[in-house]
Amino acid sequence: MARQASTTGILTDTTDSTDAQGGVAYPIDRTARVYIAGHRGLVGSALWRHLRSQGFTDLVGRTSSELDLRDREATFEFFAIEQPDVVILAAAKVGGIGANSTRPVDFLSDNLRIQVNVLDAALAHRVDRLLFLGSSCIYPKFAPQPITEDALLTGPLESTNDAYAIAKIAGILHVQAVRRQYGLPWISAMPTNLYGPGDNFSPTGSHVLPALIARYERARGQGERSVVNWGTGSALREFLHVDDMADACLFLLEHFDGPTQVNVGTGKDLSIRELAEMVASTVGFTGETRWDETKPDGTPRKVLDISTLTKLGWRSRVGLAEGLAATVEWYRTAGAGVRGQG
């Protein structure tokens, strides 16, 4: 039975719905039209570079000023015009502990609207292949480590970013629901902490690694004797270079078809204190590092179990020391063009 899009953009035929438990993935034609939502962001720009390098010839992207994905009518109009074959949903409102804890409504509302509009529009236009990108913050604060995919919804979230996490969890369930009701081979991937060229280095809105790079580089350049970081430095985190993430995204689209979100990371973690020491050394800062223990650490430890992905045959390639050095070099070269520095 042919499926028709209603005036609200939702497919009206729900007959013959199935619970898609997984199928056989297959390579994507390099001439397929691929829409990267959020193509100017950290992940989106890396995806654009990687797909180009892999021979894709028809990539589509819009800046937030060109297309506000929170606007449902504009989002559906875009899909009607562009008719993408593949969608990678990398667009999101993101930020570090400070931004998430002080503006939870923004992170919940904006991300829910972006996700619902893009996923509904993709469904209305019968997009066959879709990858939804979430975040490792979807998992409970005290989940057993390393965190397996089945830890989802088994405990309370970290309070400093629970609103963002709930939005991302809703996206995962949305993708699973589409699989069950319409049988489309849509999938979700949950990256660990990402870093690399194109990151946001804002003093108030960035994640920990770019924040440290900006802080230590500024201190070095201005001859400051000390740097103050949030928390105790004891929290353990895992970091993945964004070029590895882009490679993993294409790999999953071509090798995985299942309802469960797939963790993407290195499987290795280190303390924020150790990370700060690495950043200081990399940028050449020789002063003192102090810790403001009145500020939150966030989740005590967060490292992903990546066995699902490694069993499929994928592994990260960029080591932290190598990736950090390259990111610092990019940060210095990009100058005023760096996000968060303008």
Image: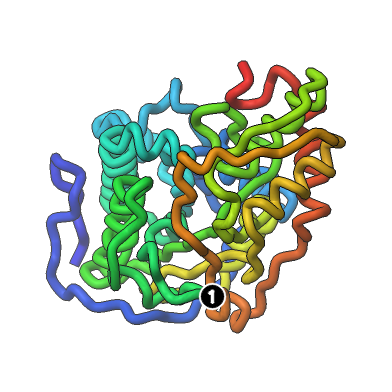
Q: Quadrant of the N terminus?
A: bottom left
Q: Is residue 208 above or below residue 337?
A: below
Q: Is residue 337 left or right of residue 149?
A: right
Q: For the residue marked with disc 1, what is the amino acid?
A: Asp
The residue that appears at 58% across and 59% down in the rendered structure is 237
Image quadrant of residue 2?
A: bottom left
Helix, strand or loop under label 1: loop
**Is residue 248 at all visible to an observer of this figure?**
yes
Q: How many marks?
A: 1
User: Residue 260: horizontal and vertical position, in percent?
Assistant: 39, 73
User: Residue 38: horizontal and vertical position, in percent?
Assistant: 49, 38
Q: Is residue 157 left or right of residue 4?
A: right
Which residue is denoted by mark 1 in the rendering? 305
The residue that appears at 34% across and 61% down in the rendered structure is 172
In the image, 2 versus 310, the foreground residue is 310
Q: Quadrant of the C terminus?
A: top right
In the image, 179 versus 242, the foreground residue is 242
User: Residue 245: horizontal and vertical position, in percent?
Assistant: 62, 57
Image quadrant of residue 334?
A: top right
User: Residue 125: horizontal and vertical position, in percent?
Assistant: 31, 49
**Is residue 250 at all visible to an observer of this figure?**
no
In the image, 309 versus 268, the foreground residue is 268
Q: Is residue 105 above or below residue 322?
A: above
The residue that appears at 58% across and 60% down in the rendered structure is 236
Q: Is residue 80 left or right of residue 285?
A: left
